[in-house]
Amino acid sequence: MQLAGRIGADEGEVTEGLVACNGYDSDSLDRPLQVGGPSERTGFITELLGSDDRALALAENVQALKPHLAKLNDRERTLLQLRYGAEMTQSEIGKELGLSQMHVSRLLARLCGSLREQLLAEA
């Protein structure tokens, strides 16, 4: 390929560059779009692009929760870490901390309810 020799690149790189040039489209995202024939649905290109990212919502929730977790005492933080970090059952947590399963259940319910209320108060 003459172009590759002239610019000092290998042919594969030049081919990739030429293919990439064909991917450029400068149409407006607000351009009306008709799918199919005249009786088919019409709309805009923007309606076809993008989607909701569930991981982004999760990341936002984690960031919103961080300052509230920082305010917890050691016992509360330990309970959450054992239940949701180590994925221990309430019975296992009770044995670890010398508490009944019912007491662990109540503590976790109260703690999670409090965190939920704090997050909802911010919204």
Image: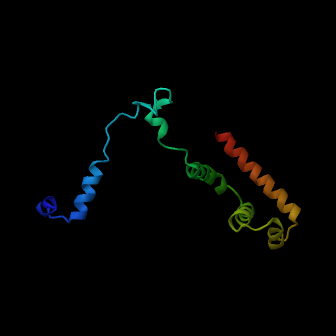
Give the x, y percent position of residue 52.
55, 45
User: Does residue 101 appear to the left or right of 80 in the view shown?
Assistant: right
Instruction: Give the answer, above or below, for where 76 lies relative to 122.
Output: below
Q: Nearer the viewer, residue 1 or 101?
A: 1
User: Does residue 29 appear to the left or right of 103 in the view shown?
Assistant: left
Q: How is the image coloured?
A: rainbow
Give the x, y percent position of residue 55.
57, 52
User: Which residue extends farthest bottom?
Assistant: 96
Q: Residue at x 34, y 35 (%)?
A: 27
Instruction: Give the answer, above or below, for where 37 lies relative to 12.
Output: above
Image quadrant containing the C terminus:
top right
User: Does residue 23 appear to the left or right of 57 in the view shown?
Assistant: left
Give the x, y percent position of residue 3.
14, 58
The quarter holding residue 71 reads bottom right
Give the x, y percent position of residue 78.
72, 65
Image quadrant containing the N terminus:
bottom left
The quarter holding residue 44 reads top left
Instruction: Give the answer, above or below, for where 13 lies relative to 51.
Output: below
Q: Nearer the viewer, residue 102 or 40?
A: 40
User: Does residue 108 appear to the left or right of 4 in the view shown?
Assistant: right
